[in-house]
Image (cartoon, grey):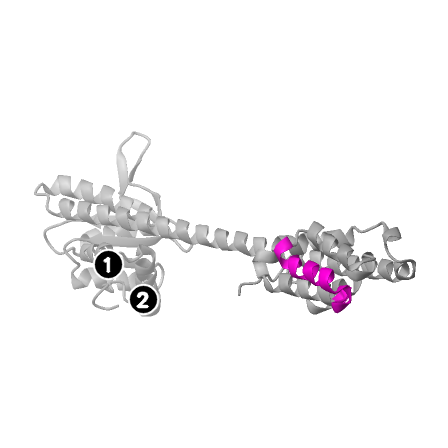
Amino acid sequence: MTKSVAYHWPPELMEMLVDTIPLLCRSKVAVLDFLRGAGVEEELLLTFRRQLQDDPSAISKYKIVRFVLGHLNEQGDRGLGARRFLLRRVTEFEDFSTCWPDDQLKAKGLVSEIRRVVNVKDSFTRLQQENDLQRQHQHRQHQEARDAKAAQAEKRRQHIRALRDELSSVIRMSDPQQRGTALEALLNRIFAAEELSIREAFVLRDDDGKATEQIDGVVELDGSPYLVEVKYWADTLGKGPVAEHLVRVYGRAGVRGLMISASGFTQPAVDECQRVLTQRVVVLGELRELVILLEQERPLAEWLREKARRAVIDREPLAIYGVHF
């Protein structure tokens, strides 16, 4: 049978009630009336009323109270209302003139002790309820945080898939100039989706307004800015364009270089980047790496961090994702 932990009478309280209620009533009939007034069903008391009519000495006030209270205690949640009401009647009892004179002092002491026990129990119950509410609140907060994180992850996945599809469309463009411009803008958006991009493509001009440098973008990882250069050429990228990017990197203190090529790099170009690794961190990447990363929905930050680590420690400016790591 299901029982309420918070309001189920413990043995010590049960015994005090059995000892107290008979003292509050002068007669056995008064005990039955006290219990009936406390919400006990008449059906439960009817047997005792008949016994008292047939033989008043057949049963005592204490036996009546013990049987009725034991029945209420075994009812669990169904007897919760009656148990509460009965307990309240006892704790609020004040007119001890209705007791036998010899029982008044003992009755007062028992009622006072029951009040103390109930107050302690109520305090524990309130504390337990507050703890339960706090746990429920924390559970809701954790669940909301998990739901928000899951929603954010799903939103990111959908965005990455859209960028992946757009990258496939850009690669299929036939006009080289249009394709290069579109790729430059798209890569900046891909880096921005990973919260790496800090500045999109920009042009530096001299006092006469003549363009002196064109930067495809700037990304930042772990506090280090990377000057980005993107090339979509038909031929493998040689030492010349790589050297031009290195000049731009050297012209800025504390800046690293990231160069992405759709057609790969010649060995002299890789060697040139390897040569400067003692002074600057330069990372080379291929467009196919980004395609794979988007297809696998892998973080670009991990990709760039691993490439930079290999460049610094292993002196490998060109470590290809899916081949070398």
Residue position for label 2: 310
In this view, the residue farthest toward the top is 208
Residue placed at 32% from the left, 45% from the top? Answer: 192
Residue 258 falls in which quadrant of the image?
Answer: bottom left
Residue 306 point in image, percent of width and height: 32, 63
Please state which of residues 121 and 251 is positioned toward the viewer in this rendering.
121
Q: Tell me the kind of residue under disc 2.
A: Arg
Q: Residue furthest left?
A: 174
Q: Quadrant of the C terminus?
A: bottom left
Give whichever of 114, 26 is nearer the camera: 26
Is the residue 49 above or below the residue 189 in the image? below
Residue 127: which numbered mark, if any?
none
Q: Which residues are magenta?
A: 41-62
Name the magenta segment's main secondary structure: helix
Q: Residue at x 16, y 55 (%)?
A: 237
Comparing 151 with 2, the one in front is 2
- Residue name at image x 34 percent, y 60 percent: 305
Q: What percent of the width, then of the height, locates residue 266?
A: 16, 61
- Does the rendering let one see residue 126? no
- Number of residue marks: 2
Which callout, 2 or 1, points to the residue nearer the camera? Answer: 1
Residue at numbered disc 1: 296
In-image side of 4 versus 26 (left or right) = left
Give x and y (percent) for residue 299: 31, 56
- x, y percent for residue 155: 32, 47
**Depicted 237 relative to depicted 313: above or below:** above
